[in-house]
Image: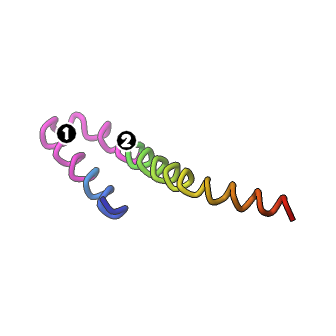
């Protein structure tokens, strides 16, 4: 899944939930959408940081040896 697909998938899910639940739940769905997207962004950032950590720690070790 590309980064651009996430908001579309989340938005589609929110719209589908709104249709199923009706207008009484609309505000709750609107309020929860940014939170869900934010969690996914946080997860992706953590994933990227974890991928970089071995490279960064090796660089830091080389820098300290100079």
Q: Is residue 56 left or right of residue 18?
A: right
Q: Position of residue 43 (x, y in %)?
A: 46, 47
Whether 1 is among the magenta residues is no
Q: Position of residue 50 (x, y in %)?
A: 55, 50
The label number, if any, that marks residue 63 in the structure image: none
The tag earlier along the polypeptide, 2 or 1, is: 1
Q: Main secondary structure of the magenta part?
A: helix
Q: Position of residue 7 (x, y in %)?
A: 32, 56
Magenta span covers which residues?
Answer: 11-34
Of helix, strand and loop, which one carries label 2? helix
Looking at the rendered image, the quarter that the C terminus falls into is bottom right
- Spatial CA span between label 2 and label 1: 13 Å
The residue that appears at 22% across and 34% down in the rendered structure is 24
The label number, if any, that marks residue 23 in the structure image: 1
The residue that appears at 53% across and 55% down in the rendered structure is 51
The residue that appears at 19% across and 42% down in the rendered structure is 18
The residue that appears at 15% across and 37% down in the rendered structure is 22
Snapshot colouring: rainbow
Q: Is residue 51 left or right of residue 19?
A: right
Label 2 or label 1, whichever lies nearer to me, is 2
Name the residue carrying label 2.
31
The image quadrant that residue 60 belongs to is bottom right
Camera-side residue of 54 and 37: 54
So how many labels did they put on this image? 2
The image quadrant that residue 1 belongs to is bottom left
């Amino acid at each position: 899944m590309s980064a651009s697909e996430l908001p579309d998938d989340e938005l589609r899910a929110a719209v589908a939930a709104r249709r199923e639940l009706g207008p009484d739940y609309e505000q709750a769905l609107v309020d929860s959408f940014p939170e869900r997207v934010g969690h996914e962004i946080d997860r992706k950032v953590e994933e990227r940081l974890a991928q970089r950590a071995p490279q960064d720690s090796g660089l830091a070790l080389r820098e300290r040896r100079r």
